[in-house]
């Protein structure tokens, strides 16, 4: 959908809610979605969900006050869309190129339940060792935030071996007071001070230093229990075998220019995808869809 088509669409708003294409930080175009119960913002760059809030509540997604909003520069917060690789790669953009590229707005759909779905598309030619593939991303804004990342291998003669991850930054009152539940007994790669294989023994994972863990072979629902905001954030997922838990804590926070020195107190990343040992192999012409649903429950 072109921006002209969208501006035409925005003149025909759904009965409940509204969708507008506006200029966000740094003049980057974003789609603002308003429903009867919630609001969301999605930058066309990276199809990056930067904001989701249930009316009357604290926002769900953390956004650094020092994030850059410039073409081809990752936005620090919200839901970075990680594709086609996770982590650093010599001479290339960390976490792949999908989050830095301008996606095309594809559809806007008011749903029967009063939510609104917006979809985006990115065509990737064969570059950086990957064959051609098409990515489609659907964001449903309602009383929860539902995300679907669909990747289709457009090559005719080669598998697509890739990683996908929704690298979600959540708002918490105080990271030192939160607990992350759902990963007890799960194997993980501890990335702090090298890479060490471990098994999670805690029913409730707590944070008192840098945490950077890739939990693998897990389809489990994860909950972030936040006593400070008196809420539980629920992360449900489908077609995802990896969950990453990250808080930079003091030293790493200071080392990131696009992240405030004290901002580690107010955030935690719980990321859903298929990374490391769970990377995916997609045969020619086949499609893989990662689904994540983010919601609140009371304490
Ligand atoms: O998901 C955790 C992680 O891989 C950390 O190691 C840290 O690098 C974080 O992602 C942020 O990566 P970025 O490239 O957005 O700075």
Image: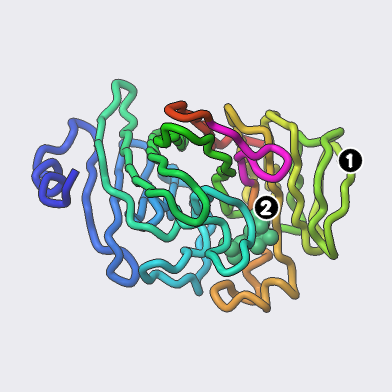
Task: Bin the neighbour count of mark 2 within 10 Å (Cα to Cα): few under 14, some 14-19, many 20 and up.
Answer: few
Judging by the rendered image, the residue that carries numbered circle 2 is: 228
Q: Specify whether 35 is left or right of 52.
A: left
Above or below 297: residue 1: below
Q: Quick check: can you spot residue 268?
A: no
Left or right? Give the position of 157 relative to 215.
left
Does the magenta run of residues contain 279? Answer: yes
User: Disc 2 on helix, strand or loop?
Assistant: loop
Residue 19 visible in this rendered orientation of the protein: yes
Furthest toward the front, the residue is 157
Q: Please give the name of the residue rendered at 61% of the width and 40% of the height, measured from the top-left corner.
A: 272
**Which image quadrant is residue 143 in?**
top left
Between disc 2 and disc 1, the foreground one is 1
- Nearest the eye: 156 or 7: 156
122 and 117: which is toward the camera = 122
Quadrant housing residue 276: top right
Q: For the magenta stretch, what is the residue range?
A: 271-282
Report x, y in % for residue 215: 75, 42
Q: Quadrant of residue 182?
A: top right
Where does residue 62 sit, x and y in percent of width and height? 54, 57
Q: How many marks?
A: 2
Q: Nearer the viewer, residue 103 or 92?
A: 92
* Crowd rating for badge 1 (residues with CA inside 10 Å; few <14, some 14–19, many 20+): some
Q: Is residue 207 magenta?
A: no
Q: Secondary structure at mark 1?
A: strand
Q: Position of residue 73 (x, y in %)?
A: 44, 68
The residue carrying mark 1 is 199
Where's the N terminus, which quadrant? Answer: top left
């Amino acid at each position: 959908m072109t921006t002209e088509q969208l501006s035409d669409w925005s003149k025909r708003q759904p009965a409940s809610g509204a969708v507008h294409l506006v200029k966000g930080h740094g003049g980057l175009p974003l789609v603002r979605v308003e429903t009867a119960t919630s609001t969301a913002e999605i930058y066309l760059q990276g199809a990056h969900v930067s904001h989701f809030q249930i009316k009357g509540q604290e926002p769900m997604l953390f956004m650094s006050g020092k994030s850059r909003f410039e073409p081809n520069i990752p936005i620090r917060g919200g839901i970075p869309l990680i594709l086609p690789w996770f982590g650093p790669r010599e001479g290339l953009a960390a976490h792949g190129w999908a989050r830095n590229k301008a996606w095309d707005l594809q559809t806007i759909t008011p749903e029967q339940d009063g939510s609104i779905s917006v979809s985006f598309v990115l065509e990737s030619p064969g570059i950086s060792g990957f064959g051609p593939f098409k990515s489609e991303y659907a964001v449903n804004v309602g009383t929860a935030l539902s995300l679907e990342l669909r990747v289709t291998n457009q090559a005719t003669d080669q598998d697509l071996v890739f990683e996908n991850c929704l690298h979600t930054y959540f708002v918490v009152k105080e990271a030192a007071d939160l607990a992350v539940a759902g990963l007890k007994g799960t194997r993980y790669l501890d990335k702090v001070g090298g890479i060490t294989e471990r098994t999670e023994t805690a029913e409730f994972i707590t944070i008192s230093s840098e945490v950077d863990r890739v939990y693998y072979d897990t389809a489990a629902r994860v909950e972030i229990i936040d006593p400070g905001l008196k809420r539980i954030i629920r992360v449900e997922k489908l077609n995802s075998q990896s969950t990453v838990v990250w808080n930079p804590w003091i030293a790493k926070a200071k080392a990131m220019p696009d992240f405030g020195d004290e901002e580690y107190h107010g955030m935690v990343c719980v990321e859903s995808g298929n990374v490391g040992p769970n990377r995916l192999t997609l045969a020619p012409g086949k499609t893989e869809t990662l689904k994540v649903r983010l919601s609140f429950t009371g304490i």
